[in-house]
Image: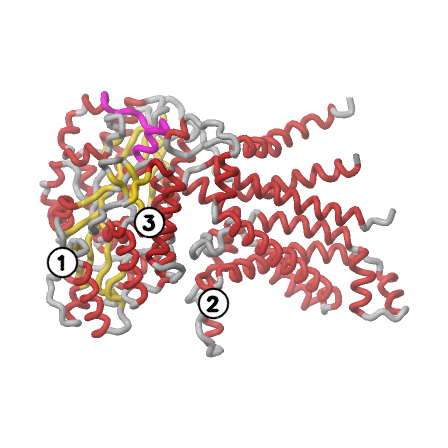
């Protein structure tokens, strides 16, 4: 008895301490009938999305007397935001009425039952016709219903510093036709400016989704093997030569010191150094980044750089050997969606459409350097003149790719990121890292969903 | 009847302590997820999470890293450093003891997230440590990248030593002066007095302290997550980090709770060992 009486509290303390390490989250007050709760991401002090939400709240509250809009901005990375949102959605008491949703999480969250089907509401909204077909597609789930309205889309291109290229004797505008052209540029610049970082691409788990969206997929989708997922057979691809080649290309960039150092690459904030310091200060010749890069450099952006429009140039990312279609890109984008459990679906949808009005969305599209999804914005002079790159980054939409947005995509993406990390840190050869990825892939999706190339 | 006054306490403990533990046990047998079809209708999958876990190559590595982290940073580092400091401060000049005390306790008083950022800034490649070694003409070492385990172990020793120090200060104050003086008169030197007189007298405090710091260290998350996030290439992924990644990054709540349950068992095993230690040496 004595032993038990002492063991029990000790075990309880043990459990408490261990659990307190992994428990998280907190409760929020319940939404009343006339309150709408909006959850969205706020990245940094100058957040175009925050501005959009504040404006919408003002307009919406003025138009609907007695209705209160509670804005709940979440500060953090995309990954942190997605986790935070998913945790809120788990309970009807904390689920938001309207929220900011990543397109690649959409299908999986629809399967989880978090999103309201908007088909009926959209049928009664005359401005829905102003959205282009590709954009409408982004809000669709596997059942064919539409669950979200896109705020904008994006592409990935090579951003290069004309000054650095010209100093090394390379003519601008520069357009690489194959991976070899990229390496040739990097070698030329390295020779002219040995302490520079001529061509950097993200790698490792630190930059998360950025590693795959703004680096690895541009390589992989430009090989003969194609992407991660075979649409025809609906299976994941293993044993891909393109995967090995892409890893080998990244390895070359890091081994020959064309990219940032491996230690810098693993820092989640490396993109801020690249966009905020290395490119503006002529330490880097080129990198692969999203079409939204100007939003950081333009007035009011995170790293204001008035000369960026003259100094920077863009080039589509070439395919491996210049094969058709010659270039490749990746696209994603964010949407607004309505919670499945909302008590006021009509009010929530009205809030969404207020945010999506031509005027509001135009301002947001310009502030955040998005690619327009409404045709009446795509033609607006404010949009076309927002920065000199709008036409170039939009043209890439013809060759762009989308991620396979399945519910286990996040885990597969991490396996890819780990492969890149192993290669750049010297932990594995490209062949070994690709083999490890194949094993991880098979473990995640099951043997029956994998096709050997 | 005796239990009636205890009822509120028992109910509270039941809800806030036993509840989450039982839920974790239950959750670890399901495929509950944050998103996807399993978020809506989680299913009972029996031991599948555990069989996956034991087949996961990352698991033995994380387990080993966790045990190394606990043994080196808590059982050896915090414990001995805390005891050493407490012994020295007994003899030190009051002013010296006060200054040292404030410095050591400062790390303990800081909120964990702040302490984690301070440690990050210290070990960061352009951080304080490399600037100091740079002045001495030594080459810069990227601690968080090249020696992630060493960095988080040192950071945890820095942060947690104050706790052990305070426990031992209190314990040493309770050791009667006459006894140590008697030992000295009998010809025992400082080391002998410590091993044969002082340590046996504060044995219970040692066991309690070991148990508490072991469990605290086992659960350390923020410090590691901020400093290395488990990297590079999982070289500092301890079990709490692994559980977090699985549950919240890959949205696999069931699998994450299975890892939490394993941690719970490890914690319980450590506590039982310490309790045994406490009991066995007790004079009958």
The quadrant of the image that shows the C terminus of chain A is: top left
Quarter-of-image position of residue A285: bottom left
Which chain does the numbered disc 3 sit on?
A
Above-or-below relation of A151 to B143: above
Q: Nearer the viewer, mark 2 or mark 3?
A: 2
Q: Residue at x 78, y 59 (%)?
A: B199
> Which residue appears farthest toward the bottom when viewing the image?
B137
The quadrant of the image that shows the N terminus of chain A is: top right
Kindly state the secondary structure of the residue where label 2 is placed: helix
- Please check the rendered image and state whether residue A110 is part of the magenta-colored stretch, yes or no: yes
Q: Are marks 2 and 1 in contact (CB under 8 Å)?
A: no
Which chain does the numbered disc 1 sit on?
A
Q: Which mark is residue A89?
A: none
Q: Earlier in the sequence, mark 3 or mark 1?
A: 3
Q: Which residue is mark 1?
A: A177
Kindly state the secondary structure of the residue where label 3 is placed: loop
Q: Which residue is mark 3?
A: A45
Q: Which residue is mark 2?
A: B128
Residue B201 in percent (x, y) is at 81, 56
Tell me if I can see residue A319 in this picture.
Answer: yes
Foreground of the two, A178 or A209: A178
Disc 1 residue crowd, few under 14, some 14–19, many 20+, Cα 10 Å: some
Residue A311 in percent (x, y) is at 16, 62
Q: Which residues are magenta?
A: A106-120
Q: Residue at x 28, y 49 (%)?
A: A240
């Amino acid at each position: 008895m004595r032993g038990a009486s002492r063991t029990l509290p000790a075990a309880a303390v043990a459990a408490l301490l261990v659990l307190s390490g992994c428990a998280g989250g907190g409760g929020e007050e319940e939404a009343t009938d006339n309150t709408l709760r909006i959850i969205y991401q706020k990245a940094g002090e100058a957040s175009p999305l925050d501005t959009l939400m504040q404006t919408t709240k003002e307009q919406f509250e003025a138009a609907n007397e007695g209705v209160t809009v509670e804005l709940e901005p979440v500060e953090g990375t995309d990954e942190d935001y997605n986790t935070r949102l998913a945790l809120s959605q788990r309970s009807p008491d904390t689920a938001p009425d309207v929220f900011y949703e990543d397109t690649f999480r959409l299908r999986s969250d629809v399967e989880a039952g978090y999103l309201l089907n908007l088909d009926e509401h959209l049928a009664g909204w005359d401005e829905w016709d102003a959205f282009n077909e590709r954009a409408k597609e982004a809000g669709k789930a596997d059942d064919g219903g539409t669950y979200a309205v896109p705020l904008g889309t994006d592409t990935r291109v090579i951003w290069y510093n004309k000054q650095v290229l010209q100093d090394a004797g390379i003519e601008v505008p520069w357009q690489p036709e194959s991976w070899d052209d990229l390496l040739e540029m990097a070698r030329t610049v390295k020779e002219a400016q040995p302490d520079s970082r001529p061509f950097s691409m993200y790698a490792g788990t630190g930059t998360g989704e950025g590693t795959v969206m703004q680096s690895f997929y541009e390589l992989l989708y430009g090989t003969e093997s194609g992407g991660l997922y075979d649409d025809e057979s609906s299976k994941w691809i293993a044993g891909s030569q393109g995967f090995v080649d892409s890893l080998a290309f990244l390895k070359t960039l890091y081994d020959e010191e064309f990219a940032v150092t491996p230690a810098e690459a693993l820092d989640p904030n490396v993109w801020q150094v690249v966009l905020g310091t290395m490119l503006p200060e002529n330490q880097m010749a080129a990198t692969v980044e999203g079409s939204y890069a100007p939003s950081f450099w333009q007035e009011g952006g995170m790293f204001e750089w008035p000369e960026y429009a003259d100094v920077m140039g863009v080039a589509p990312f070439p395919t491996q050997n210049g094969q058709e279609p010659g270039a490749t890109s990746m696209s994603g984008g964010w949407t607004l969606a309505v919670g499945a459990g909302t008590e006021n679906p009509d009010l929530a949808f009205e809030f969404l459409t207020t945010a999506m009005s031509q005027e509001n969305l135009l301002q947001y599209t310009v502030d955040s350097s998005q690619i327009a999804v409404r045709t009446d914005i795509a033609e607006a002079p404010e949009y076309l003149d927002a920065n000199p790159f709008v036409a170039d980054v939009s043209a890439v939409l013809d060759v762009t790719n989308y991620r396979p947005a399945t519910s286990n995509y996040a885990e597969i993406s991490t396996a890819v990121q780990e492969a890149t990390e192993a290669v750049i840190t010297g932990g594995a050869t490209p062949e070994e890292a690709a083999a490890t990825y194949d094993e991880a892939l098979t473990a995640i999706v099951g043997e029956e969903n994998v096709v050997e190339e | 009847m005796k239990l009636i006054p205890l009822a509120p306490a028992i109910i509270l403990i039941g809800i806030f302590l036993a509840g989450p533990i039982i839920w974790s046990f239950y959750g670890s047998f399901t495929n509950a997820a944050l998103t996807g079809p399993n978020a809506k209708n989680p299913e009972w999958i029996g031991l599948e999470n555990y069989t996956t876990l034991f087949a996961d190559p990352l698991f033995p590595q994380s387990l080993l890293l966790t045990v190394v982290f606990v043994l080196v940073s808590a059982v050896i580092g915090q414990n001995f450093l805390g005891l050493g400091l407490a012994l020295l401060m007994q003899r030190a000049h009051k002013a010296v003891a006060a200054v040292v005390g404030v410095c050591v306790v400062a790390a303990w008083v800081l909120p964990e997230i702040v302490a984690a950022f301070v440690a990050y800034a210290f070990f960061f490649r352009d951080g304080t440590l490399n600037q100091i070694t740079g002045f001495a003409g030594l080459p810069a070492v990227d601690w968080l990248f090249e020696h992630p385990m060493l960095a988080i172990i040192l950071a945890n020793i820095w942060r947690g030593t104050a706790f052990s120090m305070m426990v031992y200060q209190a314990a040493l104050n309770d050791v009667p002066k006459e006894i140590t003086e008697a030992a000295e008169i009998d010809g025992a030197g400082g080391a002998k007095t410590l091993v044969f007189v002082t340590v046996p007298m504060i044995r219970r405090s040692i066991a309690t302290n070991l148990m508490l710091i072991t469990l605290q260290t086992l659960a350390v998350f923020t410090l590691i997550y901020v400093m290395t996030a488990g990297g590079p290439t999982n070289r500092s992924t301890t079990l709490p980090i692994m559980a977090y990644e699985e549950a919240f990054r890959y949205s696999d709540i069931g699998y994450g709770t299975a890892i939490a349950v394993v941690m719970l068992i490890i914690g319980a095993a450590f506590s039982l060992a310490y309790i045994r230690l406490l009991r066995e040496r007790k004079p009958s």
